Amino acid sequence: MVKMELVGMQELLDEVQKLGDKAKRIENSALRKAGNVVEEAIKSEAPTRTGTLKRSISTSGIRTKDGAKHVLVGPGNKVFYSKFIEYGTVKMKANPFMGRGYEKSKRDAVNTIKYELKRGLGI
């Protein structure tokens, strides 16, 4: 799974904290939309033999760990073989579709977060 966090936007986050519950909704919405950006990029890189792997890629709900909110993006648990495709095996070369998708979309995801926070704050 790819982990997305809000980092490096302290001024925006300070303003968001001042707004209370509305801020939480704005922040959660921004994270979900950024997760969707990464999800689409990973799906576009996923190999397609039967389509099961691609269909299983999704964005989790908002999670909090050590005070930082994040979403997880990647294949579901039922597609256990995704790790073999991503990292390879002794008999199979790696095809890092999740890494490529993340790298391809991380700038857009950060820009999505910034845009959604500013829009929600009316800045």
Image: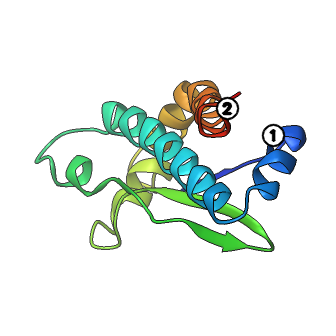
Q: Residue at x 45, y 35 (%)?
A: 37
Q: How is the image coloured?
A: rainbow
Q: Residue at x 32, y 53 (%)?
A: 57
Residue 71: % across, % down: 55, 59
How crowded pointer 2 is (Cα within 10 Å; few <14, some 14-19, many 20+) is rated as some
- The first of marks 2 and 1 along the sequence is 1
Above or below, comparing residue 3 to residue 67 in the picture: above
Q: Is residue 95 visible?
A: no
Tag of residue 12: 1
User: Tag 2's secondary structure?
Assistant: helix
**Observer-nearest of 91 and 107:** 107
Left or right, 90 with respect to 31, comes to left
Hey, what amino acid is under mark 1? Leu
Q: Is residue 35 visible?
A: yes
Residue 3: % across, % down: 61, 55
**Observer-nearest of 25 and 104:** 25
Tag of residue 118: 2
Residue 66: % across, % down: 80, 74
**Observer-nearest of 14 and 8:** 14
Is mark 2 in CB contact (under 8 Å) with mark 1? Answer: yes
